Amino acid sequence: MSFIKVGQDTQGNDINLFYQDWGQGDPVVLIHGWPADHQMWEHQSHTLAHYGKRVIAYDRRGFGKSDKPWNGYDYDTLAADLNALLEGLNLQNVTLVGFSMGGGEVARYMSRYGGARVSKVAFISAVTPYLLKTDDNPDGVGKDTFDDMVKNLRKDRPDFLQTFGKQFFGVGVVSKPVSQATLDWMQMICLQAAPHATEACIRAFSETDFRQDVPAIQVPTLIIHGTSDKTVPVDSSGDLLAKMLPNATYIRYDGEPHGLFATEDGKDRLTQDLLSFTGASTSPTSTDEGGYNAASRQA
């Protein structure tokens, strides 16, 4: 397994992040959402690597196989972790892809580190530019929503995550965009996170204002958001971010929920859009497995 040191905790112990590193070519760094880890990118990372990209997907501190310090779940620290990863692996010409909470790391990194090493960025179902409803952000989500999330996490974390997972993927009485097996898989992934990290990151992604970070983004940008996202509503996030970045490519996925990376209609469409945006090869560069051919690249 691969780990990289990104800093130390308050007791002087090293903090190491787990990452996977697949394929060859210009790097694509995938930043996962809350409360998952790098495994959520299974479909996209596998295919990008087959089509000529070097794919690095890592676990945020507190999640997955990464170390789980007590502190450091603010976005300045999380962006510093991302910077340490890019520097430690000496990555150049990077495409940063941030899903949900991960969009915050992209925005803060581009602002704080001047977009060093980065050639493109993508925001998928992202919390940017500012999720919390305030007097100067009337389209945001009320604080009581996030207070309830913290309350229910403390009450029964497994039960909360199970219920949240259904909303995350838009599962209802009639709507079944993912299988029960996928719901179980995501539950297993989310339970690997530290409870204190899960809670602290709610405050981070809901209360951090990225509106001052966004103007620092001066590279080609892709924004993708589902119109039926009940977790990070599109009018509170994707629509506003697109207005702030008028030169970005903005794609609204009609009827898709938050977790469009794994839904029946969303996962292949997202993969195709990322392949096109990153300039991946039009034919597979590895042939160790079947099913990867130019036909699968058709929209």
Image (cartoon, rainbow, N blue to C red):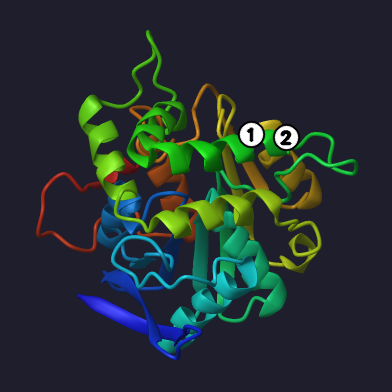
Q: Position of residue 67 (x, y in %)?
A: 35, 73
Q: Residue at x 46, y 41 (%)?
A: 153
Residue 90 visible at all: no
Pointer 1: what residue? 145
Q: Secondary structure at mark 1?
A: helix
Dot 2, crowdedness within 10 Å: few (<14), some or many (≥20)? Answer: some
What's under tag 2, amino acid-wise?
A: Gly
Q: Quadrant of the C terminus?
A: top left
Dot 1, crowdedness within 10 Å: few (<14), some or many (≥20)? Answer: few
Q: In the image as oriented, which residue stretches furthest toward the bottom?
A: 12
Pointer 2: what residue? 142
Report the label total.
2
Give whichever of 292, 85 is nearer the camera. Answer: 85
Check contact, mark 2 vs mark 1: CB within 8 A.
yes
Give whichever of 161, 259 is nearer the camera. Answer: 161
Q: Residue at x 56, y 28 (%)?
A: 230
